[in-house]
Amino acid sequence: MSRILSLSACAVLPLVLLSACSTPNGQPQKGSEPVAPNQIVDFATLYAQNCAGCHGAEGRGGASIALANPVYLAVGDENEVRNVVANGVRGTSMPAFAQSAGGMLTDEQINVITSGLFSRWGRKRILDGTNPPSYAAKTTGDTAHGEIAFGTYCASCHGSEGQGGSKASAISNDSFLALVSDQGLRTIVIVGRPELGAPDWRGNVPGKPMSDQEITDVVAWLASRRVQSPGQPYSASNYAPPHDAEHLEK
């Protein structure tokens, strides 16, 4: 019996050696080569590497809005979202990702991210039976009317002047307003931030959804509260060089 086992082992050994010789020493195994960054076309990987830092893992929200919000994906136009992903939003924390705009992603990768958002997290019939406001403003906002509308729909959570309340944070904070565009404000008012408990345009006052014009007016009022130098509560005199520094420069 032991002789038979020995013969079997001897028969297998050449096959093992031959298979080992099929890959030259120092050569990578098939499939072990790393994928170049511009060749990654997997949505989960692209989202995790480029979007999750602000919009949260699995689109659940973070410093910026949740993208796995079916109301947002139903109100937003896919072409507009693709444009934002590709070109960013000037003056805000949303950068451009397309190579043509100075980013790192190819057009194909931009398309993978955009189409993936809608196919994975969108729900086509989520707005059935409603008359949603337009994604972008169609008229000019009225700040005086916006202040009234803010008091009606927003002040109970955000405070009478947007300074924050017991239920929600400050929304007229100068640093916040400096980091968000008018369209960003409009998007938040329309789709809410469900990950933070903030309702969409239908839920601020039960049975009384905000009209398209009221949303436009609220955004105009908030935008009017932006300051020239956000995040700098000290007077300009505090930034003047000391006496001795002036003397040394002469």
Image: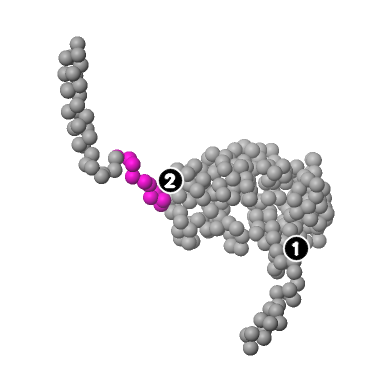
Q: In which quarter of the image is the N terminus?
A: top left
| Residue topped by disc 2 | 41
Q: What is the chief secondary structure element of the magenta stretch? A: loop
Q: Could you tell whether 112 is left or right of 216 in the image? A: left
Residue 11: image location, x then y, percent:
17, 22
Real-space CA distance between mark 2 and mark 1, rounded to the nearest whole angstrom:
42 Å
Question: Circle 1 — which element?
Answer: loop
Residue 22 in sight here: yes
Q: Where residue 163 sits in the image (x, y, percent)?
A: 79, 55
* Residue drawn at (20%, 32%) of the image: 17
Amino acid at pointer 2: Val
| Mark with earlier residue (2, 1) | 2
Task: Residue at the far bottom: name it.
Answer: 250
Residue occupying image coordinates x 19% and y 13%: 2
- Extent of the magenta region: 30-41
**Magenta span contains residue 38:** yes
Position of residue 196 in the picture relative to residue 114 (left or right): right
Q: In which quarter of the image is the C terminus?
A: bottom right
